[in-house]
Amino acid sequence: MDRLTVVDEIFLRTHRGMGTPIALQGLWRIPDAMEPALLHRIHDRLRVGDLGRRVVRARVPGARRGWRPNTSAHPLDRAGTPLPEHAILPWADTLGTDLDPEFGPGWRLSCAPLHDGGTVVALTCSHALADARGLIHAVDAALGELGAIDDDLPDTLATASDWADARAQWVTIIGGTARALRRGIPRPPATTTHEPSPDRSVHSTLLVFDAAEWDATAAATGGTPNSLFIHLVANILWETGFQHPGIAASLPVDTRDEPRVDNDLAMTEIAIDRTDTPATIRDKARTAYLRRMSSPAGLPEEILQVLPDRWAYALSRGAGERDILCSNIGTLPDSLRAVGTHHCDRVAARAIHPGITDLPRTRLAGYLSRLGDTYTLALVSLAADRETLRTALSRACATAGISAASW
């Protein structure tokens, strides 16, 4: 039985306009042209892989929505005109449209030739289908299984018992709610909200860092590669002109115990001030990773799966949103360094916000990944204009003592 988690359903609601729309994206930059037949084989593997599924509603009140295999897919999306380097991200930013994890394909494979003779490949999927590690697992499986295609996929919901799931859900909810009432339902934790300026806009950038230099800089300051990442993102925000002396940072935590395509994550947070260093942030993060952001008002989080969507959205609105988001995706598998016989000289993982109209509290999101001897930092600014972001990046990297190259 394969059912949606609470986190899956939060991202399903954002897809419907209740919250910030989020799609995940992997990007591969290859120095030569790729043959169409190879791209079509990868597309076919993804179509029958773990991303090839959609959400279906349960038949019994209280039972969770489930996943059903869905081998229909958007056609391989191939840009006809070669892109200059500066046009790669603007092109990739447009690829999150028409993704539907419930009634249609929730993912898209795209590629474009580059002016320098290379190729850029993008896999974009609704966050309802997977988180970053889940997307990486799906790609790893597809690249490692470029052989025969098996369309005979099981319908995992057909044999599942909605009645049993509904009973389990209601037992958890009623028991958890009773315990919360005995303790007295606590007020939601107070969070500082900073009013958005009217000129906020969305801009993306990708940077590459030498891993040995990054790790050495982190160690010299008493920090870790992760705490240097968080420190850098916070200082980039301050360099954009953020006026508040404190920054609240949201930190996703991977909770999976085995590789799988799911939203298997939790959120925690730390408070950062201008006196913090990578060393102090290391200590704050270690403590924060031992706790998680609590469920709404002390109630069991499963209550969000039995309420009407708009009520659930109202109860969980803004959950996990802070001034910055620092998502350390970790080390990517070596299999992602090649597509068929083609070596990838650049690989990146990030989130985009297709069709965003109402900007969230989050002003800057950073996604860090490592492949081989390089770190890639993907930044999405939801506050500064492009030139301000570029200047802030340069200043923050110079202050940290690390050098960046364009992706």
Image (cartoon, rainbow, N blue to C red):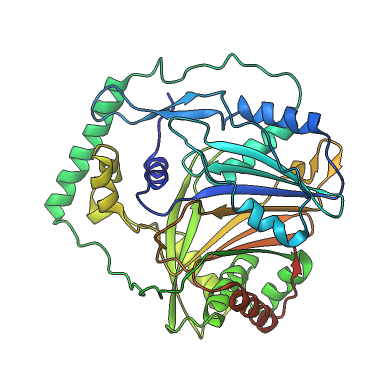
Spot occupied by residue 48 in the image (x, y as percentages of width and height): 61, 24
In screen coordinates, is 327 left or right of 391? left
Spot occupied by residue 302 in the image (x, y as percentages of width and height): 29, 41
* Residue 295 showing in the rendered view: no
Spot occupied by residue 275 in the image (x, y as percentages of width and height): 51, 86
Q: Quadrant of residue 45?
A: top right
Spot occupied by residue 133 in the image (x, y as percentages of width and height): 58, 45
Q: Residue furthest front?
A: 81
Residue 402, above or below 309: below
* Quadrant including the C terminus: bottom right
In screen coordinates, is 346 left or right of 287? right
Q: Residue at x 66, y 53 (%)?
A: 91
Could you say which is closer to the camera, residue 188 or residue 203?
203
Residue 146, above or below 30: above
Residue 58, above or below 81: above
Could you say which is closer to the camera, residue 194 or residue 219?
194
In screen coordinates, is 100 left or right of 380? left
In screen coordinates, is 372 left or right of 262? right
Q: Residue at x 22, y 33 (%)?
A: 171
